[in-house]
Image (cartoon, rainbow, N blue to C red):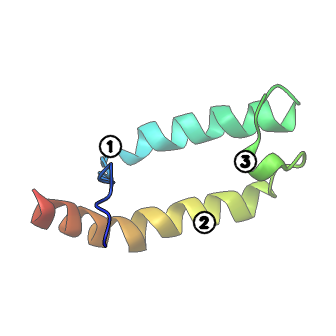
């Protein structure tokens, strides 16, 4: 006898596509708080923030290389 699941899992991803300058401003504020020990819940529980240059390089890579694909996929899903 097969049982039916009592709940159905539904996953939705919401893309909040702010202008890159807004993301930069928020990221800079977050990084400053992390560096000064004011960030209450650092990502992954890491006490030390990433080097600023690597952080900004990754940030730019995501904006330039990942976001066009993500935007295209979001538009297809609508």
Which residue reaches farthest front?
A: 1
- Label 1 – label 2 distance at C-alpha: 19 Å
User: Which label's residue is closer to the chain start, 1 or 2?
Assistant: 1
Q: Classify residue 78 as left or right of residue 56.
A: left
* Quadrant of the snapshot with the N terminus: bottom left
Reading the image, the residue beneath label 2 is: 58
What residue appears at the point 76 percent right and 30 percent down from the top-left corner? 33
Q: Residues within 10 Å of mark 1 (few under 14, many from 20)?
A: few
Reading the image, the residue beneath label 1 is: 16
Q: Classify residue 16 as left or right of residue 63.
A: left
Reading the image, the residue beneath label 3 is: 43
Residue 37, image x and y in percent? 88, 30
Quarter of the image where one finds residue 66: bottom left
SS of the residue at dot 3? helix
Quarter of the image where one finds residue 67: bottom left
- Label 3 – label 2 distance at C-alpha: 15 Å
Judged by depth in the image, the label closer to the viewer, 1 or 2, is 1
Residue 23, image x and y in percent? 47, 42
Label 1–label 2 contact, CB within 8 A: no
- Label 3 – label 1 distance at C-alpha: 20 Å
What residue appears at the point 19 percent right and 68 percent down from the top-left corner? 72
Q: Residues within 10 Å of mark 2 (few under 14, many from 20)?
A: few
């Amino acid at each position: 006898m097969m049982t039916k699941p009592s709940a159905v899992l539904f996953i939705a991803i919401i893309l909040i596509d702010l202008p890159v300058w807004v993301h930069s401003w928020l990221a800079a504020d977050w990084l400053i708080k992390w560096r000064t020990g004011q960030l209450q819940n650092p990502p992954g529980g890491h006490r030390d923030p990433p080097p600023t240059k690597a952080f900004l390089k990754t940030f730019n890579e995501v904006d330039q290389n990942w976001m066009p694909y993500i935007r295209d996929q979001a538009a297809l899903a609508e």
